[in-house]
Image (cartoon, rainbow, N blue to C red):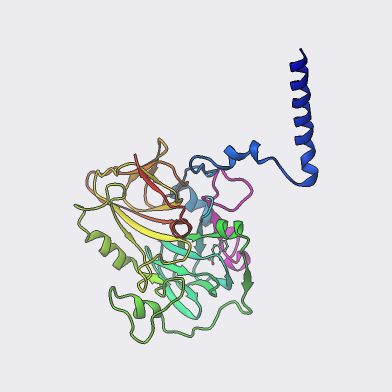
């Protein structure tokens, strides 16, 4: 009797103590240790697939309703259904579909988040990065590194659409966002057209009088004609069991990722190929470029066709499958791998 009374008194004392702690802005770690230190990453993000067939008409409708000048960037953001109140496609990465119509200009600005583009439709658009104009056609992969001035325009007679990839959720979480508009709509061109391709775009051949030491690739555009030829000429015999034949868009000077925070890839699955299930502590955004297949993420199938975009939250089991018996499938993707590797947070596991 005496014993129970004493323990009840203690329980009440502990409760009073805990409920009074808030006023000092402290909390008892012993109540939160297991919640803070999960055995493995648990992503708030959910896998999701955005269909080109559904989004293209929505994007063209935006083109009728809002001008690029008004919008500054006419983009439909790909918002993760598991993440509320934040601009995020995975917890670190952002993807969006951008439309530019004939004759339009998207004004010059710069910001600390890094950006990449993969052209999904059209040709005859361009991006200017720090005075260098780059033409953009289907399949081209273009970089807009951290704090570079950039504007877009279109000299095409048809709509041009691309996938934007940015590290905005990461930069926001790190409270490292800076932004500045340029004084004029367009910046002046100070370099030859596609200059970085001329200087750094020939595999294995680098200029002797300069060797960029920036944290991003000095090559700002990777042309589709060359990337496709490279992925198609690979022998699939020795390709990775979990990724198929996969190429990274690297910084030609260092061999490292093209941007300090994001790594980008092209991968090819042969007809009928099914990759082995694996998971890694990186999140990714994928774009189906060619072919028809599906990706199983945590047991659920996401079937894709060209133009579809899907996201893979971190540490979720996944495998890709080419559903065609006669044609190859090609996926473009970008991930936060450089960040995870830099801080020793990268792990990979086969099922
Ligand atoms: C941005 O600057 C672009 O330059 C695209 O095309 C998408 C999303 C959020 C913030 C800035 C662009 C963006 C963005």
Give yes or no for residue 16 being in the magenta stretch.
no
Q: Residue furthest front?
A: 2
Task: Relative to 18, say whether 133 is above or below.
Answer: below
**For residue 343, above or below residue 15:** below
In-image side of 192 versus 152 (left or right): left
Front-most of 287 and 103?
287
Q: Main secondary structure of the magenta part?
A: loop
In which quadrant is the N terminus drawn?
top right
Residue 121 x, y percent position in the rendering: 41, 61
Residue 175 drawn above or below residue 33:
below
Viewer-proximal residue among 269 and 339:
339
Does residue 1 appear in this view?
Answer: yes
The image quarter containing residue 37 is: top right
Work out whether residue 159 can be spotted.
no
- The image shows residue 323 at horizontal and vertical percentages of 29, 42
| Residue 63 counted in the magenta span | yes
Q: Residue furthest top?
A: 1
Q: Which residues are magenta?
A: 61-90
Return the x and y of residue 214 as percentages of the image width and height. 46, 75
Instruction: Name the side, left or right, on which 45 lies relative to 204.
Output: right
Residue at the bottom extreme of this rendering: 209
Q: Quadrant of residue 277?
A: top left
Quadrant of the picture in which ligand 1 is shown: bottom right
The x, y position of residue 201, in whole percent, is 33, 75
Residue drawn at 60 percent across, 39 percent down: 33
Q: How many numbered marks have been drawn onto this rendered protein structure?
A: 0
For the C terminus, which image quadrant? Answer: top left
């Amino acid at each position: 009797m005496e014993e129970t009374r004493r323990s009840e008194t203690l329980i009440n004392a502990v409760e009073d103590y805990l409920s009074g702690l808030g006023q000092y802005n402290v909390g008892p770690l012993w109540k939160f240790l297991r919640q803070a230190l999960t055995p493995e990453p648990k992503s708030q993000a959910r896998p999701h697939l955005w269909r080109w067939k559904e989004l293209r008409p929505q994007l063209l409708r935006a083109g009728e309703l809002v001008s690029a000048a008004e919008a500054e960037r006419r983009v439909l953001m790909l918002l993760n259904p598991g993440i509320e109140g934040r601009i995020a496609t995975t917890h670190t990465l952002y993807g969006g579909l951008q439309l530019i119509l004939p004759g339009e200009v998207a004004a010059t600005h710069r910001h600390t988040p890094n950006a990449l583009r993969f052209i999904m439709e059209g040709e005859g658009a361009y991006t200017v990065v720090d005075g260098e104009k780059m033409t953009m056609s289907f399949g081209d992969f273009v970089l807009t590194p951290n704090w570079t001035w950039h504007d877009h325009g279109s000299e095409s007679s048809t709509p041009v659409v691309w996938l934007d990839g940015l590290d905005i959720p990461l930069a926001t979480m790190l409270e490292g966002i800076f932004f500045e508009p340029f004084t004029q709509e367009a910046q002046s061109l100070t370099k030859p057209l596609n200059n970085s391709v001329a200087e750094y775009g020939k595999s294995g051949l680098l200029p002797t009088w300069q060797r960029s030491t920036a944290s991003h690739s000095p090559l700002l555009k990777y042309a589709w004609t060359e990337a496709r030829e490279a992925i198609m000429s690979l022998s699939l015999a020795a390709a990775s069991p979990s990724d198929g034949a996969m190429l990274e868009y690297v910084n030609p000077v260092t061999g490292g990722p093209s941007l300090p925070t994001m790594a980008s890839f092209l991968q090819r699955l042969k007809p009928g190929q099914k990759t082995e299930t694996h998971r890694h502590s990186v999140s990714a955004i994928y774009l189906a470029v060619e072919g028809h297949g599906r990706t199983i993420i945590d047991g659920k199938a996401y079937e894709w066709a060209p133009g579809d975009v899907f996201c893979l939250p971190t540490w979720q089991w996944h495998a890709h499958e080419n559903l065609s018996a006669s044609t190859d499938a090609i996926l473009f993707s970008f991930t936060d791998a450089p960040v995870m590797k830099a801080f020793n947070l990268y792990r990979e596991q086969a099922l």
